[in-house]
Amino acid sequence: MEKNHFLLIGSLSGMLAVILGAFGAHGLEQLVDAKMLQRFHTGVEYQFYHALALLVISILYKNIRNKYIVFAGYAFLLGMILFSGSLYLYVLTGIKGIAMITPIGGLSFVIGWGLLAFSAKNFAYSEKI
């Protein structure tokens, strides 16, 4: 039986989003201003959305198995690391240069959704991986 890495990564990412969301709501509110707290919340929100997207990818991968679905999953993972991760680091360190990574993560999300749409369009022509 083959391991489903997207199920594991999506589940752990969702769990981490809950932990970070609680930290943001209860631990950061006394340490940073409202604008920075909102940035942190945005990172948590996007991590949550894409953790759920990875869970969908894990289901689709079991049934469709084309390379575009796999690439979409990796694009979502990269987006979570770059987008959400850079927002977390920016809020926690205050280093503005870190925020320059955030749009690259956003682009990775866009690419992931595009790849997912492309995989659906080309479902009939799927290649087995």
Image: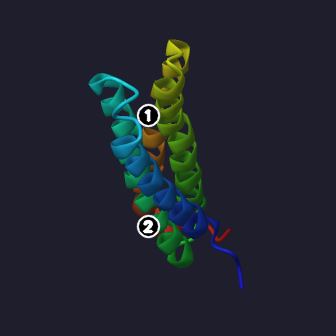
Q: Position of residue 119 (x, y in %)?
A: 47, 59
Which circle marks residue 106 in the picture? 1
Amino acid, disc 2: Val
Residue carrying label 2: 56
- The residue most toward the front is 30
Against 63, is 55 above or below?
Answer: above
Q: Position of residue 85 (x, y in %)?
A: 53, 36
Give the quadrant of the N terminus. bottom right
Nearest to the observer: residue 65 or residue 99: 99
Q: Residue at x 52, y 52 (%)?
A: 72
Amino acid, disc 1: Gly
Against 8, is 38 above or below?
Answer: above
SS of the residue under disc 2 = helix
SS of the residue under disc 1 = helix
Nearest to the observer: residue 4 or residue 126: 4
Q: Position of residue 75 (x, y in %)?
A: 55, 46
Q: Indicate which disc, 2 or 1, sits on the residue closer to the N terminus.
A: 2
Q: Is residue 75 left or right of residue 1?
A: left
Nearest to the observer: residue 127 or residue 89: 89
- The residue most toward the right is 1
How far separated are the C-alphas under marks 2 and 1? 19 Å
Protein image colouring: rainbow
